[in-house]
Amino acid sequence: MEQSKKYIEIVSALTTDKEFGPALDLMKGFHPIEKRWLTEEEDREPLSLLKWVYRDQIINPKYSTNMIKLAQLWLKYFPEIDDIISLNHREFDLALWEIAFKRITPKHVTYVFYPDNVNETYHKTRDLSNNAVDKISRSIAKNPAFQNMYYWVFSFPAKGPLGDTIEKNVGLTKSLKNNLGILDYSPGLLCNFLLNRGIPIEELLSPNQFEDLVGMIFKEEGWEIYRMKKTRDGGKDIIAKLHSKNPIITYIQAKRYSKNNKVGISKVKEFVATVAGDKISKGYLVSTSLVSG
């Protein structure tokens, strides 16, 4: 996975209260007061000052410069910075994001997968990230829940300090699942994520989310999807309709079982009976496991 992460970007929406918004601006290289992007020197030099210059010369300088003012902002927004400023560059970035994540909540996380020949298709692959950023930004902008929040939607390499911190804090874990639905992702991105991780689906998705995933895949293929309520309905979790010259209706049953927990033959027979009894032309039983003999 470590090698394949070279070709993966994460598009994420980070939210925080407006009080911490200026600190997040500074972290992303945006001047929180002058409302402009920092130069490369402004991004680097103030942290160097904090590492090598005595604090009283920064807090009460004889001559104030732009770099000193920026160093003062770092001290203002991150009083914990003295505990981590002596770390090397990568360790510092990791520690800084860990501090920030005490005030930040990731609301969306989408993986964008690039082909191995990423340099040959740079503009096309960048469009994937940009489109995901635009889509998530529009969704958040319309959501009243975020009106009094600061949010930042952006893309960044999965292999790096921020990518490592995001995955450590959320990943496709219970924390993320409680905040997001699988339907926030396009099927291709999610399936690629699962394939690249090499982790069994049943360890990542709840039964309900597995049904979402199966429904998304059918929808991507042009089917109209109807999710069923949880009742004793003979096992049909999804009804799918394909509108064509000869319309097709099919039942779908999704079983998110562990590898050692096979789908019993009685469940299969029950599903087949439901499909036949309702005079439906097709039925699909989709499972993460096998069917017992």
Image (tube, helix red, strand yellow):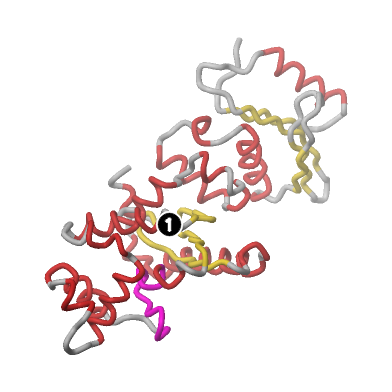
Q: Which residue is mark 1?
A: 10
Residue nearest the viewer, comparing 126 with 178: 178
Residue nearest the viewer, comparing 56 with 15: 56
Asked if residue 177 is positioned above or below residue 27 in the image, the reply reads: above
Residue drawn at x 42%, y 63% as measured from the top left: 155
Identify which amino acid the numbered label 1 is placed on. Answer: Ile
Q: Quadrant of residue 77?
A: bottom left
**Is 206 on the left-hand or right-hand side of 226?**
left
**Is 79 on the left-hand or right-hand side of 197?**
left
Residue drawn at x 78%, y 43% as measured from the top left: 226
Residue 93: x %, y % from top left: 27, 59
Asked if residue 278 is positioned above or below residue 21 in the image, the reply reads: above
Residue 53: x %, y % from top left: 13, 73
Q: Which residues are magenta?
A: 24-35
Residue nearest the viewer, comparing 291 with 53: 53
Which quadrant does the N terminus fall into?
top left
Tell me, yes or no, whether the highlighted magenta stretch contains residue 83: no
